Image (spheres, rainbow, N blue to C red):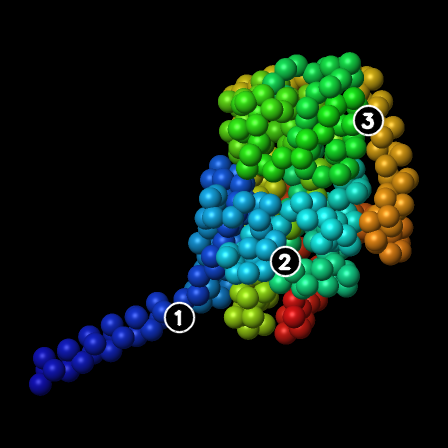
C-alpha cells in the first residue's frame, strides 16, 4: 500500500512538473546584429531575465543573434511570425514608417543616448500615426535604443575635409547620407550585417557609425582609424519590437511585463555600447583622430541647416504637421534631459522609463 501511495505521489509530482514546464512560454527573438553586439549581449538577456521575474516564470525568451533574420528582413519577419521579437530599423523601411521616422531627421538633438532613447520611446508610444504604422505592419512597439555619437570609422586616416573627397562611406539613414555627400564623400547604403565584408574587400572605405562597432561587428580587423566627428546618434532602432502574433498570445498583465522588461534591457544596452567603446580605447584597437576645424565647421553648418529644413523634408515624405511633431519631440527631449542624471543606474533608468511611459498605457488596447 505504501509503495502504491509513494508511486502515486511521484506520478503526480512528475505530472505537475510537466504541466509547469509546458506552461512556460518562450519568446523567439532575433537580435540580428551578431553575438558580440550589445543587443545580443546586454539588451535581450536583460529583457528576458526581467520578464521571467515579472511573470513569475510564465514567460522567457531565447535569442538567435544572427543568421535567422537579417536587419533588412525584420519588418516582414515580425509581421509573418518568422520571429517574435526583434530590432526594427525604421530608416531601412522609411516608406512604411514616415511618421515613426520623424525623430531620425533630428538626430543632433539630445545630450546623451539615455536621454534620446527615452524621449524617442515616449514619442512613439504616444504617437497615434506611429502606432498605426506599426499596427499596419503587424508589429507592436515597446522601445527604442540609441547609439553613442556617430564617428567616421575608416581604413585610412581622415583629418580634413579634403580627406573626405570621394570617400565611399556606409550610412544608415538619409540624414547621415546627405551629410557625407555635403562633406564630399560618397554615401553607400549597406546593411550592418554586410559591413565587415564590404570594408574588407575595399568596396567601401569607411562607415559612419558608433565606435562600439569595432567590437560588435569585428570592424577592428578591417578599419584602423576613428575620426571623432560627433555627428548625432542613430535613434531609429526600435530594438524592442514584438510581432502582433506574439502580442495576441499575451494577456494585458504579461504585455505590461514585457514592456517594462524592455525598458531595463534598453538602458542596459546603452551602457553596453559605452563599455565597448571604452574597451576599444583602453586596448588601443584603433587610432582616434581629432578632425581639423574645417570638418567641425562644416558639420555645424549642416546640422543647423538640416534642423531648419527638417519639417519640409518630412512633409515631402508625406508627414502632416511635421513642425508640430518635431516640436513635440523637442519638448520630450527637454523633459528627459531634466529626468535622467549621469549617475543613475540601469535599474533606476529602467524604473523611471516604466513610470513615465508604460505605467500610463492601457495594455488591453495598446498594440491592437
Q: Secondary structure at mark 2?
A: strand
Q: Please identify the quadrant where the N terminus is shown.
A: bottom left
Q: Position of residue 122 (x, y in %)?
A: 73, 56
Q: Dot 1 surroundings within 10 Å: few (below 14), some, or many (20 or more)?
A: few
Q: Is residue 58 visible?
A: yes
Q: Position of residue 243 (x, y in %)?
A: 57, 61
233 shown above or below 98? above
* Between marks 2 and 3 in the image, the one whose residue lies nearer the viewer: 3
For the residues bearing labels 1 and 3, Cβ distance under 8 angstroms: no
Q: Position of residue 32 (x, y in %)?
A: 52, 45
Counting residues from the start of the chain, the first of labels 2 and 3 encountered is 2
Q: Which residue is mark 1?
A: 23
Question: Which residue is at 87% across, 50% downward?
Answer: 315
311 shown above or below 151? below
163 shown above or below 109? above
* Between marks 1 and 3 in the image, the one whose residue lies nearer the viewer: 3
Q: Which residue is mark 3?
A: 182
Q: Secondary structure at mark 3?
A: helix
Q: Dot 2 surroundings within 10 Å: few (below 14), some, or many (20 or more)?
A: many
Counting residues from the start of the chain, the first of labels 1 and 3 encountered is 1
Q: Please identify the quadrant where the C terminus is shown.
A: bottom right
Left/right placement of residue 115 relative to residue 63 reads right
* Of 268 and 321, the residue lying toward us: 321
Counting residues from the start of the chain, the first of labels 2 and 1 encountered is 1
Q: Position of residue 269 (x, y in %)?
A: 57, 44
Q: Which residue is mark 2?
A: 142
Question: Which residue is at 77% across, 47% downward?
Answer: 103
Distance CA(mark 1)–CA(mark 3): 56 Å
Distance CA(mark 2)–CA(mark 3): 35 Å
Amino acid at each position: 500500500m505504501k509503495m502504491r501511495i509513494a508511486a502515486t505521489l511521484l506520478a503526480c509530482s512528475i505530472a505537475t512538473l510537466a504541466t509547469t514546464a509546458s506552461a512556460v512560454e518562450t519568446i523567439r527573438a532575433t537580435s540580428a546584429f551578431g553575438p558580440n553586439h550589445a543587443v545580443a549581449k546586454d539588451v535581450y538577456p536583460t529583457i528576458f531575465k526581467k520578464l521571467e521575474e515579472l511573470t513569475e516564470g510564465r514567460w522567457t525568451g531565447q535569442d538567435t543573434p544572427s543568421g535567422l533574420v537579417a536587419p533588412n528582413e525584420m519588418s516582414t519577419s515580425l509581421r509573418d511570425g518568422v520571429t517574435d521579437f526583434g530590432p526594427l530599423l525604421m530608416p531601412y523601411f522609411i516608406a512604411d514608417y514616415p511618421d515613426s521616422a520623424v525623430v531620425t531627421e533630428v538626430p543632433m538633438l539630445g545630450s546623451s543616448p539615455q536621454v534620446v532613447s527615452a524621449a524617442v520611446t515616449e514619442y512613439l508610444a504616444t504617437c497615434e500615426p506611429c502606432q498605426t504604422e506599426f499596427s499596419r505592419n503587424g508589429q507592436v512597439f515597446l522601445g527604442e535604443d540609441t547609439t553613442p555619437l556617430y564617428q567616421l570609422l575608416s581604413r585610412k586616416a581622415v583629418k580634413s575635409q579634403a580627406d573626405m573627397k570621394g570617400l565611399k562611406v556606409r550610412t544608415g539613414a538619409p540624414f547621415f547620407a546627405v551629410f557625407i555627400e555635403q562633406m564630399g564623400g560618397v554615401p553607400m547604403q549597406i546593411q550592418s550585417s554586410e559591413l565587415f565584408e564590404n570594408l574588407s574587400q575595399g568596396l567601401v572605405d569607411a562607415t559612419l557609425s558608433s565606435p562600439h562597432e569595432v567590437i560588435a561587428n569585428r570592424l577592428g580587423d578591417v578599419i584602423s582609424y576613428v575620426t571623432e566627428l560627433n555627428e548625432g546618434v542613430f535613434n531609429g532602432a526600435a530594438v524592442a519590437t514584438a510581432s502582433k502574433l506574439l502580442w495576441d498570445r499575451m494577456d494585458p498583465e504579461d504585455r505590461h511585463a514585457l514592456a517594462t522588461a524592455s525598458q531595463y534591457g534598453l538602458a542596459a544596452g546603452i551602457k553596453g555600447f559605452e563599455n565597448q567603446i571604452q574597451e576599444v580605447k583602453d586596448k588601443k584597437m584603433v587610432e582616434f583622430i581629432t578632425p581639423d576645424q574645417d570638418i567641425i565647421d562644416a558639420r555645424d553648418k549642416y546640422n543647423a541647416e538640416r534642423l531648419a529644413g527638417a519639417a519640409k523634408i518630412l512633409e515631402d515624405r508625406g508627414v502632416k504637421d511635421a513642425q508640430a511633431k518635431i516640436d513635440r519631440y523637442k519638448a520630450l527631449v527637454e523633459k528627459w534631459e531634466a529626468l535622467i542624471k549621469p549617475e543613475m543606474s540601469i535599474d533606476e533608468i529602467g524604473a523611471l522609463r516604466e513610470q513615465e511611459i508604460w505605467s500610463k498605457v492601457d495594455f488591453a488596447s495598446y498594440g491592437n
